[in-house]
Image: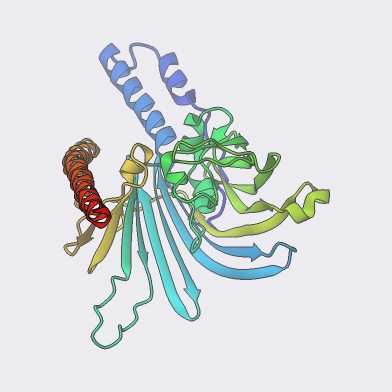
Amino acid sequence: MSHNCQSKPRAHGACWRELLRKPAHALGQVQRLLALMLVVFRETSNVSAQDYTVEGSLVHTDYLGNGTLASRFEEQFKIMVSGSKWVIRETREDHGKLLQKELGFDGTNTFQVATFPYEEPPQGKPVPIFIQGSIQASDMPAPQLVFSSTPIWLAYASGRHLSKAESGKLRPLCMLNEMGLWNTGFKVPASWKVSKTPPYVPEEVTCLDDGKTHPLDGSEARVLYAPFPNVVYTARFTNVDGLALPIDFTLTRFNFSAQRSEAGGRVLAAKDEAVAYRISPRCDLHSFRPGLTGVALVTDCRLEQKYWGRQPRYIVTNGEWNLMPYEKLAAYHEKTGVVAMRKDKRRTKIERHAVLWGMFLSTAAFAVLGLRGRHKEGGMHV
């Protein structure tokens, strides 16, 4: 880890106060004003930039309902931050095969690229796409099972997000049992305490499981159990050149178990434990979108907060994200939706007419059969 800065940083605004105390004849009025503007600009730039890079390792552990070990993996991570933008790179092994993931927030969207082990397909089968990308309309990574990107983001890049977060509400930090719910913008009750030193990342976070279902089909929610804290995050800090950043952190997740009612129903589910071994007060990145190489399958999830389940997908072969502006993407979706609705209406109208004709023909057929039957009955009695 880079050594801490030994010299005490000057208090914010001290240099421009010294400048103002200089006599007017030492600097011309215009020169004084220009120098003052330059100093203020530099100080503001230094405060807002907050460039840094953190490298470390993380161990993720899953537990069974009785508290015994279920599985464990270790990953190496590197996170690079510049102001509100960030990139996270993660690598780990799974049964001797290398898994890689890179995701970044460019100030508007979060882009993710995951590379899975390449395997030769069986004879006659198509070659699988082992590079997968995704786009989220969010400044944080969506929780996933294969990597622990969200806890890393929380520890080192969530300062801006938390400063703008709704009081007492956060996006979920772990995978939800209800599929698709996270992408809708769903939030959970939460409390947090941030460091008083830039970049103002959290010292403590607690999230609450409300114990309810959250149906996306408009049906009524059901209460399953009493609310309880299901995510607890804590961190220990160090200081590098005036930046307060976690030297290590732990995120613990709990599940509800009806069999453990004597303990409030809460059982240990998973734990992420990370240690930073290198912290540098610089960020040497020019692009905060991960690169696409080879043939990649990209899933665009930006519409899901408004149109749940809508995830356009496309194949990329030229290394470009081919990002369609959100407004055009939404307009295209609404247009295709109207066209589909018109087709459904036409199809429904045709089906309705078909049903009516079917009913008419059936009635006519039964009427004919009835008349024939009566005619036969009459003939029998003659």
* Frontmost residue, 280 versus 223: 223
- Left or right: residue 199 versus residue 315 is right
Instruction: Identify the residue at horizontal 31%, vertical 42% (top origin).
Output: 303
Where in the figure is residue 160, as x and y percent of width and height? Answer: 46, 36
Q: Quadrant of residue 97?
A: bottom left
Instruction: Identify the residue at horizontal 54%, vertical 47% (top origin).
Output: 173
- The type of colouring in the image is rainbow
**Total number of numbered discs in the rendering:** 0
Query: From what the image shows, is residue 3 above or below residue 48?
Result: below
* Frontmost residue, 226 versus 163: 226
Identify the residue at the far right of this view: 262
Instruction: Identify the residue at horizontal 65%, vertical 69% (top origin).
Output: 70
Where in the figure is residue 373, as x and y percent of width and height? Answer: 25, 53
Identify the residue at the far front of this view: 382
Instruction: Identify the residue at horizontal 68%, vertical 39% (top origin).
Output: 227
- Left or right: residue 155 versus residue 362 is right
Identify the residue at the far bottom of this view: 123
Quadrant where the N terminus is found in the figure: bottom right
* Frontmost residue, 10 versus 172: 172
Where in the figure is residue 334, as x and y percent of width and height? Answer: 22, 37
Query: From what the image shows, is residue 123 above or below residue 63?
Result: below
Q: Is residue 31 visible?
A: yes
Q: Is residue 325 visible?
A: no
Q: Quadrant of residue 345?
A: top left
- Left or right: residue 41 versus residue 318 is right
